[in-house]
Image (cartoon, grey):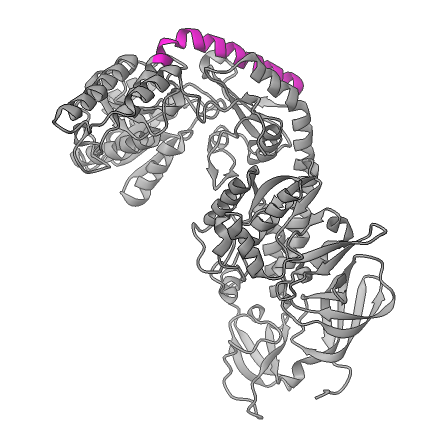
Amino acid sequence: MTRDVTAYLDHAATTPMLPAAVDALTSELARTGNPSSLHASGRAARRVVEESRESLAAALGARPSDVLWTSGGTEADNLAVKGLFWARRREDADRRRILVSAVEHHAVLDPAFWMAEHAGAELVLLPVDRDGVLEVEALREELEAHGDQAALLSVMWANNEVGALQPLDAVVSLARRFGVPVHADAVQAVGQVPVDFAASGLDALTVSGHKVGGPGGTGALIARRGLELMPVQHGGGQERGVRSGTLDAALLASFAAAVDQAVATRDVTAPRVAALRDQLVAGVLEVAPDAVLRGPADTARRLPFNAHFTFPGCEGDSLLYLLDSAGVEASTGSACQAGVPRPSHVLLAMGVDEHDARGALRFSLGHTSSADDVAALLEALPAVVDRARAAGLAAVR
Amino acid sequence: MRVLAALSGGVDSAVAAARAVDAGHDVVGVHMALSRTRDQFRTGSRGCCSIEDAGDARRAADVLGIPYYVWDLSEQFEQTVVADFLAEYEAGRTPNPCVRCNEHIKFAALLDKAVALGFDAVCTGHYARVVVQADGARELHRALDEAKDQSYVLAVMGPERLARSMFPLGDVASKDETRAEAAARGLSVSAKPDSYDICFVADGDTQGFLRARLGSRPGEVVDTAGEVVGEHDGAYAYTVGQRRGLALGRPAADGKPRYVLSIEPVNNRVVVGSADELLVDVVTADRAVWFSAPGEDFDCEVQVRAHGVPVAARARVVGGVVEVTLVDGLRGVAPGQSLVLYAGSRVLGQATVTASSRARAAAR
């Protein structure tokens, strides 16, 4: 039973490829040559890889030598958490605390939990406020008490569920005082807000290809040259010996083209999409007055493409099914376990109770979003919420 | 019709959903997540709720071209089915968790939610038939393949829920036919082993599960004369009719095997006796559910366990209580079991066994 999608409002999950990325991919795809080979074909492929590296670096305020290609955001986050921890601990055995915000993506949280369970790390979850923004004071207290034991600090640029921009300036300056390297997952931020690696003062930053209109299976860890990182994936010694594996010139060219276009057009795209998002938020609160906008109400403090609500008395999975039936594609925003929406760890960390957290829905817009998408959602939503609420009541009967 | 097809990840529910699609219904697949701590893979034939099963269900939905969702019913499942399972064993009764699941989850929580979301019916891979009479009355009947028949565990649903249920596999000739159909449809679960055990007892060790959840409660095993003949680690772990697992200190006087005759939860005793002493011919059951109003006194066949053989009986109905007198006796009738009454292939109703006794001297 196929039906035409009338509104795609899940760009934060993945977004359509940008034309420049499609062009780059298709023009490179048939080329033969391993970038590590020394012959002419290899050199040609290598040139594409290095030009892509220069392009990506330029778009993100980094130097080409800072760029470590990975298979995606998850691998880059794993490399940052594990690689930094092991490198720091080798230098100083006391540095075993991993500091992460409580609202990190699972690609950061889970490696951090894993390191605590298997690699002798101590995990410190840093609290956030009701808007999902890191409590800088809590970080200060942690560093003042245990700063000499901190191996690394990872705080995302912007939260993927509720869109909260994080106070990275304050985080970086605090961490610097205690000599703690800082990593930021900027997967959702690139293309939506200015991301300048050098200006940020960060030591490492994660970016993903498919979230910005590039191909899946691409990502990078921008890691300050000179930053000690233990490799997680061993092999042929590519990428400074930190991340082995044959590089795919076509994918990387496409990834770099996507980031370049997303960043270059951000001045036009972001305000346009932010205006749609504002219409969406106002419209949702009008047709479903008891819906609660989660994340900062001040739009300057949240991602321009993000809107997130909880609908009291509704289950997220009912809302998703009913919207899907009506041709509107959204997300609960949180990770699933085998497709089961769990109450989001982000909402719980923000102090939302488990019951309310079950009624969460994230609407995320992107470069192809239009007023029609918002209109389709607002048309479908009243009946969807009524029905989901009735089903929620049936469940507790 | 808008049909919600419950997809377990097994072959039956996948073929049932496929048949619902073929019948022209607007079908949506839903996998029920019934446990929060799920094993990654299932081992052998055990269980049905692993993440692998959820993946198989999703793949089946993909092949059928239907939407697929996972609904988390783990909380309701724990509060009704698992809690009832523990409470019943603790009270010395023998529950059937599949019956409770059909009563509280599949044809209650799932069905209610489906109806609230706009579905007309729930479709499952159970082997049973819904027969619609000329006057529109819907009857629940045994499956054509009596070896696979599951009408016993469905009898608890009653007529209102039956009206919103669909069992497309009721008329397949055998499980082999279902598997062949699955293979022909390109469903990768066609050769997946059947699940027989209780899904939340992952390793099939019911006694171990009960001990882990209820704790060790040592007590005495006695014979019908009150003589202590052994010890046990918790009376709750025994079932009427059970022979194996009785670590008895000394053999019976007659040298014949002994069976559990009854559980006495209050004084934590297990009473054992001979096979002959296990025989009963009167069974009383309460909480009766009927598909249509029963007579006060009628002949029927009754079945007391899922894979049991139906036996001829005379039933008397007083309010919600049924008393059946068996033409021949039955062994191993335990309080807590479902008593299902049939007229030929048609399910009349079901009730929960409260007591059994022997009115006549042993026939044989």
Q: Is residue B295 visible?
A: yes
Q: Residue furthest front?
A: B184
Looking at the picture, tell me which residue is in the foreground, A337 or A250.
Answer: A250
Specify the quadrant that holds the N terminus of chain A. top right
Q: Which residue occupies 57% across, 56% down?
A: B178
Extent of the magenta region: A261-289
Give how far across and how far down residue B273 sits, in percent: 62, 83
Q: Is residue A94 left or right of residue B239?
A: left
Q: Is residue A397 visible?
A: no
Q: Residue furthest right?
A: B296
Give how far across and how far down residue A70 sits, in percent: 28, 29
Q: Which residue occupies 63% across, 50% down?
A: B124
Specify the quadrant that holds the C terminus of chain A. top right
Give how far across and how far down residue B131 sits, in percent: 76, 55
Residue A172 lies in quadrant: top left
Q: Residue furthest bottom?
A: B254
Residue B258 lies in quadrant: bottom right
Q: Is residue B267 left or right of residue B43?
A: right
Per the picture, the main secondary structure of the magenta-coloured stretch is helix
